[in-house]
Each structure stands twice: as structure tokens, then as C-alpha cells.
Amino acid sequence: MKTLEEVFETWEAVIGLEIHAELTTLNTKMFCGCKLEFGAAPNTHTCPVCLGLPGALPVPNKAAIESIVLAGLATNCGIEKHSMFYRKNYMYPDMSKNFQTTQGPIAFCMRGHLDLEVDGPAAKERYRLDSLKVGESNGNITRTEDGYRAHVGITRIHMEEDAGKMVHLGGGEGRIAGAKESLVDYNRAGTPLIELVTEPDLRTPEEARLFMQKLRQIYLAIGISDCSMEEGSLRCDGNVSLRRRGTEAFGTKTELKNMNSFKNLHDGLAYEICRQAQVLEEGGVIYQETRHWDPSAKRTIVMRVKETADDYRLFPDPDLAPYDLSDEFIEGVRAKLPELPDQKAARYSATFGLSAYDARHLVDHRATASFFDECMALVQAEDEGSKFAKPLANLVINDVTAHLNANPGVQLAATPLTPARAVGLVQLVADGTISSKQAKQVFAAILDEDKDPTVIIEEKGMKQVSDTGAIEAVVDEVLVANPDKVTQYRDGKTGLMGFFVGQCMKAMRGQGNPQVINQLLAQKLQ
Amino acid sequence: MSEMFGAMGIARLKAGLAAKEFSAAEVAQGALARIAEADQQVHSFLEVTEQMALAAAAQVDKAIAAGTFGEMGILAGVPVAFKDNMNLEGTRTTCSSRMLENYVSPYTATCVEKCLQAGALPMGKLNMDEFAFGSSTETSAFGPTRNPWDLQRVPGGSSGGSAAAVAAGLVCATLGSDTGGSIRQPGAFCGVVGLKPTYGTVSRYGVVAFGSSLDQVGPFTRSVEDAALMMNVLAGRDPLDCTSQPCSADFTANLAEGVRGMRIGVVPEFMEAKGLTDEVRQKVADAIKQVEALGAQLVEIDLPHARAAMSAYYVLGPSEAFSNLARFDSVRYGYCDPGHTDLGSQYDASRAVGFGAEAKRRIMLGSYLLSAGVYDKYYYPAQQVRTLIIQDYQQAYEKVDCILTPVAPRTAFKFGEIGDPTEMYLSDMFTISINIAGNGGMSMPVGLGEASGMPVGVQLISPAFHDANMLRVAAALETVYGPAPVAPDFADGKVA
Amino acid sequence: MAEHLTETDVRSIAEYSCIGLTAEEVVAMTADLNAIIDSLAPITEYNLEGVPPTFHPIGDLANVMRDDVEVPGFTQQEALMNAPKQEDGSFLIPSILGEGGDR
């Protein structure tokens, strides 16, 4: 099979996403007062409504409607005042009523968009990006300094309910295929679910991944979901088709499922694009079908062939009142909009002088962004201005993120690293008390020993020696011990400066102030 | 012979309890004995809830002994029974279907709960057409109910058991549900008062759905006052039903006001309808004369789109039913055909065996009507026609306060007399447009037909949420025709 | 009587609705449904242009919602009390796909 890069020479991929998010931060289900809880014993959070008992009737959760309106406002959607719930009828055992309550042609949120900043390696997937100059646009993308900006349309976000969960017995690895029996648990049935559908505006797997990441940041920022791809509270299906470069008509699309991580989303789409290219280039036909990404086998497999368009017998749900949202309701929700990631990044750049790149990476994770905010609040309180912004940003983007990545599941707030300690650490470097190299050790020690940085450097005797007299003595010793190197340096081999600095640092067991050492060496070697 | 407590009016029964003429336990035991004797012929009950009735009676007797009977609810000590599509925790709710033969309710419907809260003695669950699909109670999987006026005839349907139990004097009042005439038509066939309130007046929570935008719960009684008392118990907003509406009216308030000055609408097109029998036409015409004699002003009105109501109903009802009945799939409850190794064949077989012929027809019809393309040909236009029918009524109510029409084109027919489904559907020709529009409607007995000797009812129709209007007219008619009698063969403790 | 539905259509509807019909039942059902659909003709005979549909018979019904407050529900035993088949606190069903089947 060709690589993605090779495929893109001939083919253009057209990708649209359908992203489901469970509103896990609510107390109760969409249409009944049952508790929302992940991982409870099976069928312990049910009632007549979510079990679909005869005679039961749904009543919508107002907080869920507020959440979807919030999601729409945060993704630049228009909020439709008049919409209805519909029934989507088909028999499937995880759906207790054998219809899903969802929305019809008009959803609460219509016609939104997100702008993606695609840079670094992610931008390289885009075919012939270099043909664009900075600021120049082509279709929905605009070239930027670091890569490009993609404008991705959102068709709609509609409100619906999740289905129950099934465990398949007797098949391989709990898969439905080959299973002899299945167990059905309706705890999840009726969980409020919002489905966002994008326009087919995405062209590379990286764009798809970045869209998903950005949407996740937004949902986390507005607090409507825990967005756990692992537990399935954030799920993504991808629709993929290919067309020859330079042509307009869409090819036949396949729907890709089971992309339950950002990596799987990228890799699944990349595989499917390459697979379709191979089929087409061999003169084959793409069937409209649902395919399942198998990350261990690194391939997609057919789940279901759609012979005809599904006919779900959609009709307005007579049990649910239509919506006539007031301006007051919508404005009330708008007032609850927090600072969104893009706004936060813009503020970091404007207020603290951070680069756009740093600012964006700071807001990548809600936990690190709020940690950074707390740190900046501390230094500003001490009226130190924003000179700490860059070192604090570096600490958060590099060290903190690395630590969290290395320890999955660890919550930043639960670690011994408090904002005050982070600020203390950065201050110790800034005033020359410790070197940035020592700072790495102190950072590790804070997390290991749960102590303040000042205590740690005291205990470990890590104070940086900046005393010129003490350093001068060491510099002299080093120069005396290496007369031949001194001669070589003076003959023009200035690259030996690093050697002398290293020897001095070694003699001082790493505690010498490198700036002072450099200064003195330069003087004495002239 | 047992004491005929079920034949008493609510006020008379409660006065007797208050005066300690008899105890609530005696009422319960008397009603149970009467059901055991007489219902062998009528077959109105599917389940008799003896223990619940006796327990409720004990509570009433306790209150009587403590002198707090007056503080109890409207139905304290009154034997009532419920159509078997209404959930009552701990009882079977079968909807007269094999599908739910062994289904035990784990919760209680709001309308039933309100009766219990009002102190009613719950006597049991009543036979019906399967899932309320029918007009004769012949589609019950557990055998038909017989009309107490003539055991060779149907009681009407779908709430046939509810009407027959009241007509036979087994209980004071029952609850039924009405989707296209299922309270009013059996009310007329059995000669009792049957009231379908305005859609939204009574909570549908816990009542097994047929057509969600059409279904409404209402009472059967033998007097207008009892119907109004039942409405006082049942009406009101239920937080568990989005379509229920606040209602604090006292339905008994203007029963005694008479009809002087009221404008009563008559529909010439209905009186000349093909299929309307002479004996029914004659009794309805007589009732029209009576209200005029009582001082009401008659106004001829036109309901030009009522003609399409039947078609709209057979689009909307089955479409909603198809979706509502999808949940009966053998997974969580209901009939599960044994021995299947794949779910598809278990579904097909369980629903093939569990549902009767009429239920299957309606599900299939609804599935067709909602399918792509067909939706635009029938379903959507039916909802537009609904708008026109509502407008017809709104225009009529500018001129009248209440409308008087026949309930059904004929009196109760004999078992097996009507076999063709489309002919059976004509039973609802005068009642259906009211469900489509959502208005209130009731049947009021006005004596016996000359040819058949069977009861005839007139239908009174009120503007939405003005159900008191039709009760007022019904009370006036009652002064002429008298309250509904217990069917003669069951009166005075007889057993037919 | 017009033929709105063929026996093939009826079999396909029965499949979607998950109702097993015998060959004779398909014949009878086809006749019944065609007769009923014939009787729906009045619906198609009005000029309905510009007439809004009424999906909910109560005209001004809108925005009916509840607060996000937990209400006690069923125990596991209550949830399963009518289950035809159960195992380990869950409803038990036979193979969804069947032998080599599709959903």
C-alpha cells in the first residue's frame, strides 16, 4: 500500500466527522431523573422511562438543553429557537424503546465553525502547502508563519440520548461477531448526548485530529463533559471519501468507527485513505459501508454494508413539547460562557507577550492552562510583572506536560506541585540562586518529596555559587591544569570554550553560575 | 344475592359510610362477591385485586373509626377499577395481549395513583381490545367482554371492560382510555356516562401508549355528577407527562345551572351520515329537542374537514402505535419465544406470537406510513389536515358552547357481526375528529333504541379545556333521561 | 382496490418491524393494508399548500422541562423483575448477528 504522502499526490481525501459527547457533568439522564454514573453495577440506575417500560413518558432535562446551547455558542453556531425532538425508529437491543429520541431537520445548534491552527509536523500532511505564501488562502485554508489555518464548518449539533451497553459472550475478545449471547445493561441508556456533525471540510487525518482536540478543549472549558475517549464519553466517527485532485464530485464514502483515541482517529483515517486509494487504483469500487478500525491489526474491517439509505421512520415525538427558546434563555446561557481556549491563548499573547505557539500549547490542556493562570495570578500579586511568563510557560509546556504524559491518570491538582512552588522555582532560577539545570532536579524533587523548592535546595546544598572570588579560583585551577588547550584556544580554536566551562562546572559539582564562569574564562583567555 | 354497592352513586355510597350504615370492608367484600358472581357472564375483569381492595378499605374504616373520614379524598371507600393498560404496581398490566400476559407492573400510573390517593378501593383491572386496537373488545387475547344489556352483543371498545363493569353495577366508576372513541363508543353501547377529557387534562404517565398525540384517560360512571367527581380527582398537571396541563377547575361547579342561554351546535352532515341507523338518529334528534326545550339555543354548524378525520386518524394512530409498540421485543419484558439462537428470529417469533392480528396490522401500517416518501404522502398531510380540523372546531366554537352529535352510527352489534377491519373502523366516525383536534367529548345515555332495544348515547363536545360545558349539558339531559340504570339483567343483584 | 403495496413490500415492512409472518399471513396482510390505504385517500384530496402541520394538539405547548435533580429509581432486582432471561444483573439475549449474519 502507498504511504499517505504518495496517495495525496493523486488523491484528495474528503473527511467529515460525527462527534458524540455525553453530558457527563450533569446529575441525571436526558429524559428521567436517574443518576448519571460510569461504572456502576449493571441496571442499578434505571427507572420506567430509561428501561422503556410500557406507559413511561420522557421529560427533558433542562440542564442538558442549556449545555447544548452552551456548546453551540462556543462553536460559533446559530441557536435555533424552534426545534423539536423526533423519534428515530429501529430495533436494537441496547435501545430500550427501540427508538432513539433525537432531533429532526432542525437542531438546537446549526451552522457553526472552528478555525484550526495546523503547524509543525501536522502541517506537512497537507498537499503542497508550500505553494501558498503566508497570508494567502486556498479554499478553506490560509497559510500562516508556522503552517496554516483551516476554517472547518459545523453543520449542526443536536441533542439525543445514548443507548445502553452490551457485553458480548462467546465471541473473540468480547466482540459482537461470533458471540453466542449478549448481556444488556441500561445504566447508560438515556444519558444526554450531543452529536456534532462537521461539514466535509477536512482534508488530512491531522486536521481531523486537531479538530477533535480543539473541540475537546472547548467542551472541557465549558464543562459539559469529561470528554473521556477511553470511557466513551467522547466518541468520533469519520466519513471518508477520495476524489482525484482537481475534480469536484465526491467519491463514495465509508464510515469509520472505533477511533477511541486521537492516535486511533489519525491512524484509522490515514489507513482508510490509503486503502481506498489502493482499491481505486486497482480499478475496484468503494462500497458505502461501515468499517471498524482495529488498532492492533492496524487495518479497518467491514462491519456492515449499507445497501440502501437507512429509513429510520423519523417523525416528531408526540410525547415531547416543541421548543420555543426565548432570547432570555439563550442570553442566560451565553452569560455562562467561560473564557474559551482561543480567547485564553490570545490573552496570553497580548498580556504576557507569549508567542502564539506557546500560548496555544498552554491552553491545550485545561488543567495546565488553569495552573498557568494561577501561577500568573501569584506573580502579578507580587507585582513582578510578566517577566516570569515565559519561564513559567516553559515549565508548564515542557516539564509539567512531560510529567503528566509519563503518569497517565494523574491529576495535576493532586500532585505536590502547587502554583506557589512552581513560581518559587522559577524565581530561584531568575535571581540566579540555582541554574536551570539544577531547576530540573528541584522540579523532580518537588514531585518526589513534596517539599518547597527553597527547602529542597537547602537540604541538597544545591545553591548556585555566584561568588566571583570562589569561581575565579576554580577557573585558574582549570587553566593551569590544561596549558596545551589554553594555547590551542588562543590559536583560534574557540570551540574549546565549552570544554573549559564543563571542567569548571565539574570541579564545582554543577553549582557554579555558568554566566559568571563564562565571563571569567573569557577574560582570562584573552 | 350480594349488596349492590357498585350500583350506588358516589355521594350515596359515601353518605352510607359516613353514617356507618355499612363499613368500607363491607363495601369491598360486597363488590368482590358481586364481581365473582356476575362477571362470570360479563367477563369485564382480567384480574381482581382483592387484597389491595381490602387493604384500602381497612384504611377507610380506620378513618371512619377515628372520625377523620371527612378529611379523606373524594373517592374514600368507593370501589373503582382500571382498564388493563394502566399500570398499578404489583398487578399484571396485560393490555389484553399475549405479549404482556405475565407482565407485572413495577410502578403505578399517575391516573391510578390519583384514585388511590383519593381513597378509592382498587377492585382490579379491566378487559379491553388488545393494546386498545378495536371497537368491540373482541380483539382481547383473553376473550371478549359481553354487553350487560345483551350478552350476545359486544360492549364496544376498546374500553369495553370499563364500560361493562359500570353498566353491570360491579363498581361505581372505572377508568378507560380514548384514542379515537374508546371511552365514548363503549359508553354509548353499554348505556353509561363515558368522558374523554380535553387532551392534556389527565396525565398519560403509566398508561400504555397507543397514539400518544390522541390518547386521553377518562372515567365511566352512571351519573354526570360522578363523572365530574372523577374528573376532580384525575385532572391536573403531572410533572411526569410533558403534555399534561394545569387544571384546578371544579368540574361539579355548574352542573345544576341548566342549559338556558347556552348555544348548542348540531351538525346536519352528521345527522344525515351514511351508515347512521334510524333508531340512533331518532334518539339523537329527540335529545336535541330536549335541550332546546330546556332553554338552549340550537345552532347549525359545519365541520367541513371532519370527513377527512377518519383518514387522518388511520394515518396518525397507527404511525404512533408502530413506534410505541416497538418496545415489546422480548428483551426486558413481555413474551419471549423460546429456543432461538439469534436475536432476529427471537424478535420475529416473539412479536408474531405475542401480538394479535389487529395489532400486527396497525404496526405494519404505521411502519409503512412513516417510511421514506410515504411520510410526505400521508403522515405530513394528515398533520396538516389536523390543523384544518382544529380550525373547523375553533370556528364552530365562536358560535356555540357545546356540540351535540351521535356517538356511534348504531347500537351494540352482535359478536362476529363485523369482521372486516375497515367496516369496524366506521364505529368511530363521529368520535375520531375530537381526538384529532384534542377537544373534550363525552357520551351521555339517552334511552334505548326502538329497533334493537339497546342503549343509545349522544356525544357532547366541548372546546378545549372547557370540559365543564359538556358536563353542564349532560347534567341537563340527565334531568330528562335520568341517570344511567344498571343493565336490567344485573339490576337488584340479579345474575343474567 | 389499488395496489399500494406488493407482497414483497409487505415482507420488507414485516422484516423492519420484526414481525414474523407466514406466507398466508403475507397474502392476507397485503390485502388488508391495501384496503386500509385506499380508505386514506381523503388525506390526499385537499389543497394543503401553506397549511402548517399540528404535531401536538395543545397549541401553545412549549419548553416543558424538568430540573436536573436525581430521583430514586429501580433496584437491579426491580429492573429485571420482568426479564425473560437474565444473567449477572443484566438482560440476556441470544446472538445479535446470528450465524454469520449482519445487524
Image (spheres, coloured by chain):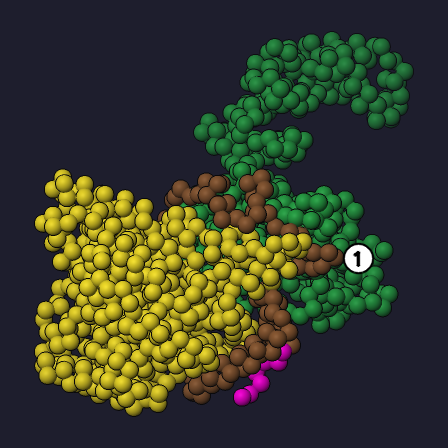
The chain painted brown is C
Could you say where residue A16 lies in the image, as x and y percent from the top left?
65, 60
Pick the residue in front: B351 or A25: B351
Could you say where residue A467 lies in the image, as x and y percent from the top left?
65, 12
- The picture's colour for chain B is yellow
Q: Is residue A31 left or right of residue B252?
A: right
Q: Is residue A400 visible?
A: yes
Query: In the image, what residue type sits under mark 1?
Result: Cys
In the rendered image, the vertical position of residue A177 relative to residue B465, given as above or below: above
User: Could you tell me which residue is drawn at 20 percent across and 78 percent down?
Assistant: B447
Residue B294 quadrant: bottom left
Q: Is residue A36 left or right of residue B122?
A: right
Could you say where residue A92 lies in the image, as x and y percent from the top left?
59, 57
Residue range (magenta): C1-7
- The picture's colour for chain A is green
Task: Please check the rendered image and state whether residue B316 is part of the magenta-colored stretch, yes or no.
Answer: no
Helix, strand or loop at mark 1: helix
Could you say where residue A383 lies in the image, as x and y percent from the top left?
46, 29
Q: Is residue B127 left or right of residue B253?
A: right
The residue that disc 1 covers is A274
Give the letter of the chain under mark 1.
A
Give the dominant element type of the magenta stretch: helix, strand or loop: loop
Pick the residue in front: A288 or B149: B149
